[in-house]
Amino acid sequence: MKKILLLAIFAAAALTQIQAQDQAIFSHYNISPILIHPAAAGFGGQHQLLFNARMQWTGFPDAPKTFMAQYNGPLSKSFGIGFGVLSESAAQLRRTRAQLNYAIRFPLGDDWEMAAGFSTELHQIRLHGSVSENGFLDLGDRIIDSNMDGIRFLDASVGVYGTFKKNTFGGLSFTNLVRSRLDGLVVSDEKESLFNYYVFYLGHKFEVEDLNFTLEPSVMARQIRDVPFQMDINLKAGFLDEQLLAGVSYRSLGVMGVMLGTQVSAFNLYYTYDVSFQQFQQFNDGAHEVTVALNMKKKGKK
Protein backbone atom coordinates (compact mmCIF):
# COMPACT_ATOMS: atom_id res chain seq x y z
CA MET A 1 0.00 0.00 0.00
CA LYS A 2 2.86 2.37 0.87
CA LYS A 3 4.52 1.68 -2.49
CA ILE A 4 1.31 2.38 -4.39
CA LEU A 5 0.86 5.64 -2.49
CA LEU A 6 4.43 6.68 -3.30
CA LEU A 7 3.94 5.94 -6.99
CA ALA A 8 0.72 7.97 -7.00
CA ILE A 9 2.45 10.94 -5.36
CA PHE A 10 5.35 10.69 -7.78
CA ALA A 11 3.03 10.54 -10.79
CA ALA A 12 1.20 13.66 -9.66
CA ALA A 13 4.46 15.47 -8.99
CA ALA A 14 5.89 14.41 -12.34
CA LEU A 15 2.80 15.66 -14.15
CA THR A 16 3.20 19.07 -12.55
CA GLN A 17 6.94 18.96 -13.20
CA ILE A 18 6.70 18.36 -16.94
CA GLN A 19 3.79 20.74 -17.49
CA ALA A 20 5.27 23.64 -15.56
CA GLN A 21 8.97 23.52 -16.34
CA ASP A 22 10.45 26.85 -17.29
CA GLN A 23 13.99 28.01 -17.88
CA ALA A 24 14.32 28.57 -14.13
CA ILE A 25 14.35 24.82 -13.46
CA PHE A 26 18.13 25.06 -13.86
CA SER A 27 20.09 26.18 -10.82
CA HIS A 28 23.03 27.51 -12.88
CA TYR A 29 21.26 30.73 -13.86
CA ASN A 30 23.74 32.57 -11.60
CA ILE A 31 26.43 31.37 -14.02
CA SER A 32 24.46 31.94 -17.24
CA PRO A 33 21.55 34.41 -16.80
CA ILE A 34 20.29 33.46 -20.30
CA LEU A 35 18.67 30.46 -18.57
CA ILE A 36 16.03 32.74 -17.03
CA HIS A 37 16.27 36.06 -18.89
CA PRO A 38 15.85 36.35 -22.70
CA ALA A 39 17.39 39.84 -22.55
CA ALA A 40 20.73 38.30 -21.50
CA ALA A 41 21.29 36.92 -25.02
CA GLY A 42 24.68 38.19 -26.18
CA PHE A 43 24.85 40.57 -23.22
CA GLY A 44 28.45 39.82 -22.29
CA GLY A 45 29.70 40.53 -25.80
CA GLN A 46 30.73 36.91 -26.30
CA HIS A 47 29.41 33.86 -28.10
CA GLN A 48 28.44 31.00 -25.80
CA LEU A 49 27.65 27.35 -26.40
CA LEU A 50 25.89 25.89 -23.38
CA PHE A 51 25.12 22.25 -22.60
CA ASN A 52 23.14 21.43 -19.48
CA ALA A 53 21.89 18.21 -17.90
CA ARG A 54 19.78 17.96 -14.75
CA MET A 55 18.70 14.72 -13.09
CA GLN A 56 16.20 15.04 -10.23
CA TRP A 57 15.21 12.45 -7.63
CA THR A 58 18.00 10.14 -8.81
CA GLY A 59 17.58 6.52 -7.79
CA PHE A 60 13.80 6.69 -8.11
CA PRO A 61 12.21 4.97 -11.15
CA ASP A 62 11.32 7.29 -14.05
CA ALA A 63 12.63 10.35 -12.20
CA PRO A 64 12.65 13.70 -14.07
CA LYS A 65 15.56 14.33 -16.45
CA THR A 66 16.26 17.48 -18.45
CA PHE A 67 18.81 18.05 -21.22
CA MET A 68 19.45 21.29 -23.06
CA ALA A 69 21.75 22.66 -25.77
CA GLN A 70 21.81 26.40 -26.38
CA TYR A 71 23.72 29.11 -28.21
CA ASN A 72 23.63 32.86 -27.59
CA GLY A 73 25.79 35.72 -28.75
CA PRO A 74 25.91 39.22 -30.22
CA LEU A 75 25.01 39.88 -33.84
CA SER A 76 26.09 43.50 -33.51
CA LYS A 77 26.97 46.00 -30.80
CA SER A 78 23.31 46.47 -29.88
CA PHE A 79 21.62 43.22 -30.90
CA GLY A 80 21.89 39.70 -29.48
CA ILE A 81 20.28 36.40 -30.36
CA GLY A 82 19.98 32.94 -28.87
CA PHE A 83 18.40 29.63 -29.73
CA GLY A 84 18.21 26.25 -28.07
CA VAL A 85 16.53 22.88 -27.79
CA LEU A 86 15.39 21.27 -24.54
CA SER A 87 14.24 17.71 -23.90
CA GLU A 88 12.77 16.55 -20.61
CA SER A 89 10.97 13.53 -19.24
CA ALA A 90 9.15 12.62 -16.03
CA ALA A 91 7.50 9.24 -15.58
CA GLN A 92 5.75 8.55 -18.93
CA LEU A 93 5.58 12.18 -20.03
CA ARG A 94 7.95 13.67 -22.59
CA ARG A 95 8.43 17.30 -23.57
CA THR A 96 10.47 18.87 -26.36
CA ARG A 97 10.95 22.63 -26.51
CA ALA A 98 12.56 24.83 -29.14
CA GLN A 99 13.33 28.40 -28.11
CA LEU A 100 14.47 31.56 -29.90
CA ASN A 101 15.66 34.62 -27.95
CA TYR A 102 16.09 38.18 -29.18
CA ALA A 103 17.74 41.02 -27.22
CA ILE A 104 18.37 44.70 -27.91
CA ARG A 105 20.97 46.60 -25.88
CA PHE A 106 20.76 50.33 -25.37
CA PRO A 107 23.06 52.79 -23.55
CA LEU A 108 22.01 54.53 -20.35
CA GLY A 109 25.27 56.26 -19.47
CA ASP A 110 28.78 55.22 -18.56
CA ASP A 111 27.79 53.12 -15.54
CA TRP A 112 24.66 51.40 -16.84
CA GLU A 113 24.21 48.65 -19.42
CA MET A 114 20.67 47.55 -20.21
CA ALA A 115 18.94 45.21 -22.62
CA ALA A 116 15.35 44.30 -23.43
CA GLY A 117 14.57 40.83 -24.70
CA PHE A 118 11.85 38.58 -26.04
CA SER A 119 11.66 34.82 -26.51
CA THR A 120 9.34 32.59 -28.49
CA GLU A 121 8.94 28.91 -27.68
CA LEU A 122 7.39 25.90 -29.36
CA HIS A 123 6.46 23.04 -27.00
CA GLN A 124 5.38 19.49 -27.67
CA ILE A 125 4.15 17.26 -24.84
CA ARG A 126 3.38 13.60 -25.39
CA LEU A 127 3.00 10.32 -23.53
CA HIS A 128 5.54 7.56 -24.01
CA GLY A 129 4.33 4.71 -26.20
CA SER A 130 4.60 2.22 -23.33
CA VAL A 131 1.48 3.81 -21.78
CA SER A 132 -0.65 1.96 -24.34
CA GLU A 133 0.55 -1.34 -22.87
CA ASN A 134 -0.76 -0.51 -19.41
CA GLY A 135 -3.58 -2.84 -18.40
CA PHE A 136 -5.39 -0.03 -16.58
CA LEU A 137 -5.61 2.11 -19.72
CA ASP A 138 -9.15 2.99 -20.73
CA LEU A 139 -9.12 2.53 -24.50
CA GLY A 140 -10.69 5.39 -26.38
CA ASP A 141 -9.95 7.94 -23.64
CA ARG A 142 -9.86 11.25 -25.50
CA ILE A 143 -7.27 12.87 -23.22
CA ILE A 144 -4.93 9.87 -23.34
CA ASP A 145 -5.24 9.60 -27.13
CA SER A 146 -4.50 13.30 -27.68
CA ASN A 147 -1.40 13.11 -25.48
CA MET A 148 -0.19 9.99 -27.27
CA ASP A 149 -0.25 11.95 -30.53
CA GLY A 150 1.46 14.91 -28.90
CA ILE A 151 0.05 18.27 -27.81
CA ARG A 152 1.75 21.33 -29.26
CA PHE A 153 1.50 24.91 -28.09
CA LEU A 154 3.29 28.23 -28.31
CA ASP A 155 4.61 30.27 -25.41
CA ALA A 156 6.62 33.46 -25.01
CA SER A 157 8.39 35.61 -22.46
CA VAL A 158 9.64 39.18 -22.33
CA GLY A 159 12.02 40.95 -19.96
CA VAL A 160 14.90 43.29 -19.20
CA TYR A 161 18.41 42.62 -17.94
CA GLY A 162 21.16 45.04 -16.94
CA THR A 163 24.28 45.85 -14.97
CA PHE A 164 25.41 48.86 -12.95
CA LYS A 165 29.15 49.56 -12.77
CA LYS A 166 29.71 45.99 -14.03
CA ASN A 167 29.36 44.38 -10.58
CA THR A 168 25.67 44.93 -9.80
CA PHE A 169 23.34 42.97 -12.05
CA GLY A 170 19.73 41.95 -12.28
CA GLY A 171 16.73 41.32 -14.45
CA LEU A 172 12.97 40.88 -14.58
CA SER A 173 11.16 38.67 -17.07
CA PHE A 174 7.50 37.75 -17.52
CA THR A 175 6.89 34.16 -18.59
CA ASN A 176 3.99 32.07 -19.89
CA LEU A 177 2.60 34.99 -21.90
CA VAL A 178 1.09 32.74 -24.57
CA ARG A 179 -0.39 29.28 -24.20
CA SER A 180 -2.21 28.87 -27.55
CA ARG A 181 -2.52 25.28 -28.64
CA LEU A 182 -1.51 24.74 -32.26
CA ASP A 183 -4.18 22.08 -32.56
CA GLY A 184 -6.92 24.56 -31.67
CA LEU A 185 -7.86 23.04 -28.31
CA VAL A 186 -8.56 25.38 -25.39
CA VAL A 187 -5.80 25.27 -22.79
CA SER A 188 -7.61 27.00 -19.95
CA ASP A 189 -10.76 28.98 -19.34
CA GLU A 190 -9.06 31.05 -16.65
CA LYS A 191 -8.77 34.77 -17.27
CA GLU A 192 -5.27 35.74 -16.21
CA SER A 193 -3.15 38.85 -16.42
CA LEU A 194 -0.25 38.76 -18.86
CA PHE A 195 2.08 39.52 -15.96
CA ASN A 196 0.95 36.89 -13.44
CA TYR A 197 4.11 34.84 -13.99
CA TYR A 198 7.55 36.33 -13.56
CA VAL A 199 11.22 35.72 -12.69
CA PHE A 200 13.19 38.36 -10.76
CA TYR A 201 16.96 38.17 -10.27
CA LEU A 202 19.35 40.55 -8.47
CA GLY A 203 22.95 40.24 -7.31
CA HIS A 204 26.24 42.02 -6.66
CA LYS A 205 29.87 40.93 -6.95
CA PHE A 206 32.33 42.07 -4.27
CA GLU A 207 35.98 42.01 -5.27
CA VAL A 208 38.81 41.55 -2.76
CA GLU A 209 41.78 42.34 -4.97
CA ASP A 210 44.45 41.76 -2.31
CA LEU A 211 43.28 38.16 -1.86
CA ASN A 212 42.36 37.55 -5.52
CA PHE A 213 38.89 36.62 -4.32
CA THR A 214 35.30 37.50 -5.24
CA LEU A 215 32.06 37.02 -3.31
CA GLU A 216 28.71 37.20 -5.09
CA PRO A 217 25.39 37.08 -3.20
CA SER A 218 22.18 37.01 -5.24
CA VAL A 219 18.47 36.33 -4.94
CA MET A 220 15.96 34.94 -7.40
CA ALA A 221 12.17 34.98 -7.04
CA ARG A 222 9.85 33.27 -9.47
CA GLN A 223 6.16 32.64 -9.94
CA ILE A 224 5.43 30.44 -12.94
CA ARG A 225 2.39 28.54 -14.06
CA ASP A 226 1.27 25.58 -11.91
CA VAL A 227 4.27 25.86 -9.54
CA PRO A 228 4.35 27.30 -5.99
CA PHE A 229 6.14 30.60 -5.48
CA GLN A 230 9.87 30.06 -5.06
CA MET A 231 12.71 32.23 -3.76
CA ASP A 232 16.40 31.31 -3.97
CA ILE A 233 19.19 32.79 -1.89
CA ASN A 234 22.61 32.20 -3.47
CA LEU A 235 26.19 32.83 -2.43
CA LYS A 236 29.00 32.24 -4.93
CA ALA A 237 32.74 32.67 -4.35
CA GLY A 238 35.52 32.90 -6.94
CA PHE A 239 39.20 32.15 -6.45
CA LEU A 240 42.35 32.66 -8.57
CA ASP A 241 40.79 35.14 -11.00
CA GLU A 242 37.57 33.06 -10.83
CA GLN A 243 39.25 30.02 -12.31
CA LEU A 244 37.74 28.13 -9.37
CA LEU A 245 34.17 28.70 -8.19
CA ALA A 246 32.15 27.43 -5.26
CA GLY A 247 28.66 28.26 -4.13
CA VAL A 248 25.69 27.39 -1.99
CA SER A 249 21.97 28.01 -2.57
CA TYR A 250 18.85 27.67 -0.47
CA ARG A 251 15.38 27.53 -1.98
CA SER A 252 12.17 28.34 -0.18
CA LEU A 253 10.74 24.98 -1.28
CA GLY A 254 13.13 23.31 1.16
CA VAL A 255 16.11 22.51 -1.06
CA MET A 256 19.79 23.28 -0.57
CA GLY A 257 22.37 23.06 -3.33
CA VAL A 258 26.18 23.04 -3.36
CA MET A 259 28.02 24.10 -6.52
CA LEU A 260 31.61 23.62 -7.69
CA GLY A 261 33.03 24.89 -10.97
CA THR A 262 36.03 25.91 -12.98
CA GLN A 263 36.74 28.41 -15.73
CA VAL A 264 39.84 27.74 -17.80
CA SER A 265 40.17 30.06 -20.78
CA ALA A 266 37.03 29.49 -22.90
CA PHE A 267 36.08 26.24 -21.16
CA ASN A 268 33.62 26.26 -18.24
CA LEU A 269 32.46 23.30 -16.16
CA TYR A 270 29.98 23.44 -13.26
CA TYR A 271 28.37 20.81 -11.05
CA THR A 272 25.63 21.20 -8.44
CA TYR A 273 24.19 18.69 -5.99
CA ASP A 274 20.78 19.43 -4.44
CA VAL A 275 19.32 17.81 -1.36
CA SER A 276 15.74 18.31 -0.17
CA PHE A 277 14.56 18.66 3.41
CA GLN A 278 11.17 17.19 2.52
CA GLN A 279 10.09 13.64 3.36
CA PHE A 280 10.41 12.42 -0.23
CA GLN A 281 14.20 12.83 0.03
CA GLN A 282 14.44 9.50 1.88
CA PHE A 283 13.30 7.72 -1.29
CA ASN A 284 15.85 9.25 -3.68
CA ASP A 285 19.48 10.37 -3.90
CA GLY A 286 18.93 14.07 -4.55
CA ALA A 287 19.41 16.05 -7.75
CA HIS A 288 22.48 16.53 -9.93
CA GLU A 289 23.10 19.28 -12.47
CA VAL A 290 26.05 19.58 -14.85
CA THR A 291 26.79 22.48 -17.20
CA VAL A 292 29.51 22.67 -19.84
CA ALA A 293 29.94 26.02 -21.57
CA LEU A 294 32.30 27.40 -24.20
CA ASN A 295 32.67 31.18 -24.17
CA MET A 296 34.22 32.83 -27.22
CA LYS A 297 34.74 36.58 -27.19
CA LYS A 298 33.79 38.53 -30.28
CA LYS A 299 36.86 39.73 -32.14
CA GLY A 300 37.09 43.48 -32.50
CA LYS A 301 38.01 45.25 -35.71
CA LYS A 302 41.64 46.23 -36.08
Image (spheres, helix red, strand yellow):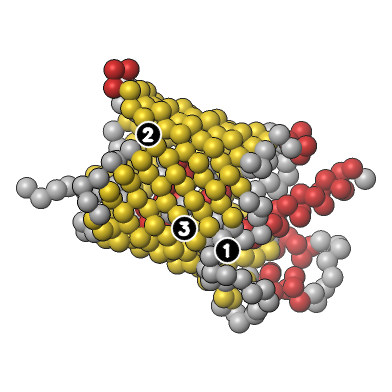
Quadrant housing residue 284? top right
What's the residue at 36%, 41% (across, down)? 168
The residue under label 3 is 173
Q: How far apart are marks 1 and 2 (CA)?
A: 30 Å
Provide residue 4's location: percent of width, then percent of height. 87, 48
What's the residue at 45%, 31% (across, down)? 236
The residue under label 1 is 196
Closest to the observer: 224 or 263? 224
Type of residue at label 1?
Answer: Asn
Type of residue at label 3?
Answer: Ser
Quadrant housing residue 287? top right
Closest to the observer: 293 or 154? 154
Q: How far apart are marks 3 and 2 (CA)?
A: 21 Å
What's the residue at 33%, 23% (across, down)? 208
Question: How many other residues sit within 10 Å of disc 2, few (<14), some (14-19) or many (≥20)?
Answer: some
Type of residue at label 2?
Answer: Lys
Residue that lies at the very extreme toward the right in this rendered image: 1
> How many numbered marks does the figure carry?
3
Name the element at disc 2: loop
Quadrant housing residue 106? bottom left
In the picture, the disc for residue 205 is: 2
Name the element at disc 3: strand
Name the element at disc 1: loop
What's the residue at 78%, 37% (across, down)? 279
Question: How many other residues sit within 10 Å of disc 3, few (<14), some (14-19) or many (≥20)?
Answer: many
| Side of 234 relative to 131 (left or right) | left
